Image (spheres, rainbow, N blue to C red):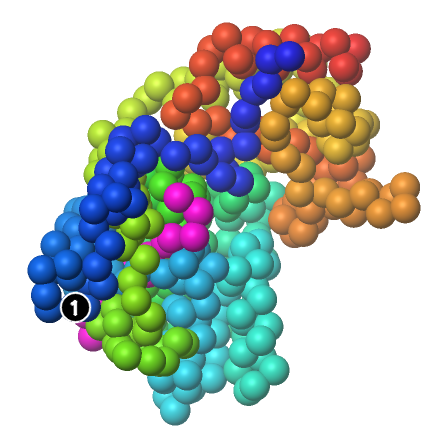
């Protein structure tokens, strides 16, 4: 049975080049990168090279890259670390209602210990209102955290406008770019963000590795205390093996960002869906300002989970949840005011580097057979 993977936003396979880059660390380079002897020195060089590769992709200095265990830890370090270090200046944080749980939940935790958090809404395309963010700003606002792109719909947020607002008011700005890095250009000098989250398994690196860009001058409290690794911000012997994988993935990504092939294939898929189902299929998210690989569509009057269950050889996802026969809409679609009859039929198809046109044609056939 042919199996087709269209869930690249959930996780990506390891790129062959990434596997090759990691192999020496599995065999020959086992020393502690903090050790000064012959076994540690070359491992430290591998780690530094990986840091430089990540920095090159997003346009920052190597010393501004902190390796983490993934996007969730990077978000926690950004939010909690900044709050703990700067709460004497204020206790107010602004974020959005459509953030990933790796941002929402840390914010809710901080609310329990004294933070005040404002969650701004989005329009029908899932984009936040810069005006609403500005209205939420007060004298005690110290941090704004808005995702670069939405993991469910692929909608890109107006980061430049938010950054201008944050800079004008002297507020630190963090963006979770887990879904964007490697798919669209992400340069911290152009975005002018203070912190930016990277998740390795979203760009063909291993799971369990990520990074947080921290602009020079931004002060955070460490979440993991110990021997002062990662410039004193993350204690614990560095996971050089996975860091090397992330570094190589970032190096490869530079050749893929801006490549139109993936967008053309995603557009081809959307055109095929419209031809097959007409007004029975609707796009969720912004029609233009979205990731080139992400297609969140609703099959009107259907249930997304039922459709996927009928095509077990297809790997895709739906943000809706089914409880005792009732459908609970994805929180993101709910915030976008997508009607329940439409939203319950939502499926997120996320294409990737290894998706082919033949696979898209096969998925269209499966959907046609299942829905008709």
Identify the residue position indicated by label 1 in the image: 35
**Residue 327 x/y as whole percent:** 82, 43
Number of labels in the image equals 1
Q: Which residue lies furthest to the right in this view?
A: 324
The residue shown at (60%, 13%) is 2
The residue shown at (47%, 11%) is 357
| Mark 1 burial class by Cα count in 10 Å: few <14, some 14-19, many 20+ | few
- Residue 46 appears in the figure: yes
Disc 1 is placed on an element classified as loop
The residue shown at (71%, 27%) is 308
Residue interval drawn in magenta = 206-217
Where the C terminus falls, by quadrant? Answer: top right
Which of the 4 image quadrants contains residue 35?
Answer: bottom left
Q: Toward the viewer: 252 or 131? A: 252
- Residue 52 appears in the figure: no
Which of the 4 image quadrants contains residue 176?
Answer: bottom left
Q: Toward the viewer: 294 or 256? A: 256
Is residue 90 highlighted in magenta? Answer: no
Is residue 214 highlighted in magenta? Answer: yes
Q: In this view, does 149 lie above or below 143?
A: above
The residue shown at (51%, 54%) is 128
**Residue 83 x/y as whole percent:** 42, 80
């Amino acid at each position: 049975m042919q199996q087709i993977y269209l869930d690249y936003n959930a996780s990506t396979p390891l790129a062959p080049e990434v596997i090759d880059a990691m192999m020496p660390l599995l065999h020959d380079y086992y020393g502690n990168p903090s050790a000064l002897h012959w076994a540690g020195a070359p491992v430290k060089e591998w780690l530094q090279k990986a840091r430089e590769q990540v920095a090159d992709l997003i346009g920052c200095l190597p010393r501004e890259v902190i390796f983490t265990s993934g996007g969730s830890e990077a978000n926690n370090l950004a939010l909690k670390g900044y709050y703990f270090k700067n709460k004497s200046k204020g206790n107010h944080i602004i974020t959005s209602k459509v953030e990933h749980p790796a941002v929402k939940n840390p914010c809710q935790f901080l609310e329990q210990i004294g933070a005040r958090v404002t969650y701004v809404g989005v329009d029908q395309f899932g984009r936040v209102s810069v005006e609403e963010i500005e209205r939420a700003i007060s004298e005690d606002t110290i941090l704004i955290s808005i995702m670069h792109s939405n993991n469910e719909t692929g909608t890109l947020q107006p980061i430049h406008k938010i950054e201008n607002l944050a800079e004008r008011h002297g507020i630190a700005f963090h963006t979770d770019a887990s879904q964007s890095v490697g798919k669209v250009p992400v340069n911290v000098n152009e975005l002018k963000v203070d912190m930016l989250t990277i998740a390795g398994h979203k760009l063909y690196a291993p799971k369990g590795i990520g990074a947080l860009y921290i602009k020079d001058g931004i002060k955070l409290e460490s979440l993991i205390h110990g021997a002062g690794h990662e410039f004193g911000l993350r204690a614990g012997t560095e996971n050089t093996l996975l860091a090397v994988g992330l570094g190589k993935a970032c190096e490869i990504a530079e050749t893929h960002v801006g490549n139109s092939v993936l967008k053309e294939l995603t557009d081809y898929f959307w055109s095929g869906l419209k031809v097959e189902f007409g007004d029975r299929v609707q796009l969720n998210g912004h029609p233009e300002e979205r990731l080139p690989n992400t297609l969140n569509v609703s099959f009107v009057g259907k249930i997304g989970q039922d459709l996927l269950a009928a095509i077990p050889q297809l790997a895709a996802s739906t943000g809706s949840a089914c409880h005792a026969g009732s459908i609970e809409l994805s929180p993101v679609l709910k915030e976008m005011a997508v009607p329940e009859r439409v939203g319950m039929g939502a499926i997120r198809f996320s294409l990737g580097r290894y998706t082919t046109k033949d696979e898209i044609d096969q998925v269209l056939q499966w959907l046609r057979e299942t829905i008709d």
